[in-house]
Image (cartoon, grey):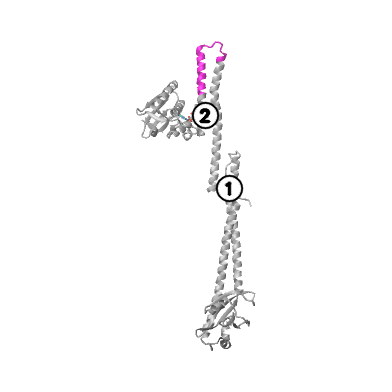
Amino acid sequence: MKKSIKNRLVGNFMLIILITVVILEIMLINGIKEYYYNNLETIMTNQIEFSTDFYSRYFSSSSIEDIIIDDIDVFWQHTDAQVQILTLDGKLLMDSLGIRNEENLIYPDIESAMENMKGTWTGYVPYDDESVMAVSMPLKYQGTPIGIIRFISSLEQTNNNIFQISRFLILMGIIVVLFSGLVSLFLANSIVKPLAEVTAAAEKMADGQFKTRSRVTLNDEIGRLSNTLNYMADEILKKEQLKNDFISSISHELRTPLTSIKGWAVTLKDLEDPDRKLLEDGLEIIENESDRLTLMVEELLDFSRFTSGRVQLEKDCFNIKDTISIIAKQLKPRAKDNKITFTVSMDDDLENYIGDENRVKQVLLNILDNALKFTGEGGKVSLITYRDDKNIVIEVNDTGIGIPKNDLPNVKQKFYKGKNSNSHTGLGLSISDEIVRLHGGSLDIDSKEGKGTKVVVKLPLEEVVL
Ligand code: ADP
């Protein structure tokens, strides 16, 4: 049999039902048999007691042989059963069917009667095909046992009745087993069918068909599995799209400085007698563009290190005030060129911080680079650094183009970049976020489209030595 969930479910269910039904049937049939046998025994006992008690008072003699001769008919007047009278040592004196037996009879019921008790026995006798029930009691004359009276009744009718009832019960049992088989088949199908559908959808997805969707019929475990599978496919599609966008944009980003470098290299090579100024300008552009390329490649390398978890911070104690001052100094000319007012303010109580200075620099440069990139002429960019209870807080505010509300939750994601032409690889913020996270801090962005953006970096003070 195929080892499928359906077969296992139906098989186990049927096995449990079958075992239950068989146990119940055995108990029921035994109970019924017991009931019928007890009933018959009670009837026979009553009849014997009636015969013996009532008439023993009027027995004409203390000898069992005399009683048989005088009062024989009183014993079988009130019963259809076979009646036997025996001596106290089990010798058969009289049998209502005329059966004779020279030897003493040895049956458990007779043995009980010999000990002055009622005895019952069921079993086979040589002169009947059916089993019989025998009930024996002592026959008493003025309270003293003088013989044994034994009633024997054929169990044919009783067994017949039990057989009829048992047959009915077994039939019902078979119907119950068959019915539960059908129900379990239906139940198993209701589980296996949706599972087969989910598997088919998963197989298609594994084959690269990520537009396939698994049908969600019920909100049960399988429904939730379908939802998860669909969510996974959505995410894969999104990532695929991001990857494609990233490749095309990165190619574009790499091509721009390369074109410029190549253009200037050709121009300078073709010049027969280049004047110094032109030569210097050209070489400077080549140098700047090469720096840009290097930065971009570094960002990509950083990204790959971050995604593979290979980044380790090289922590050391450094003066964060100095670091910020250096960066501010570095960016001021650029702000001036772009006609942006760039202000820097720092609390006096900032001094030493334990962290990876280069990585902190990288974060600040990236955030400030974004602020300058996305702020137009006449705009303002401010860098504010202070201490709160637990952190060193670095705030960068700009009055630039801002981030649309819908984009805001995504800007920290890898490869996510806005539609603005100033956007680059879309990796800066995700790398910065990761660096801040590795320092145990947080990076939060708040922005209003058209109004400006505020980026708040918190570096926890536990790491600060003052
Ligand atoms: P990119 O290299 O594109 O700048 P980032 O991860 O640094 O990548 O930023 C992701 C995107 O977030 C940017 O493309 C831009 O759309 C948006 N963004 C980030 N900072 C700002 C800002 N100060 N003002 C407006 N948009 C911003």
**Does residue 352 appear left or right of residue 171 in this picture?**
left
Residues tagged 1 and 2 counted as in contact (Cβ below 8 A): no
The image shows residue 439 at horizontal and vertical percentages of 43, 33
Q: Nearer the viewer, mark 1 or mark 2?
A: 2
Depth check: 14 or 172 in front?
A: 14
Of the image marks 1 and 2, the number of the one nearer the N terminus: 1
Q: For the point 55% across and 42% down, which residue is it?
A: 229
Drawn side of residue 193 relative to residue 303, left or right? right
The kind of secondary structure the magenta stretch mainly shows is: helix
**Which residue is label 1 attached to?**
195
Q: Which residues are magenta?
A: 268-292
Which residue is farthest left? 348
Q: Pinpoint residue 331: horizontal percent, then vertical percent.
A: 43, 23
Magenta span contains residue 280: yes
Residue holding disc 2? 301
- Choose top left, top right, bottom left or bottom right for residue 170: bottom right
Instruction: Measuring from the top left, give residue 305's x and y in whole percent.
Output: 51, 31
> Could you tell me the amino acid type at mark 1?
Leu
Q: Position of residue 394 (x, y in %)?
A: 40, 30
Count of numbered circles in the view? 2
Nearer to us in this view, 388 or 58: 58
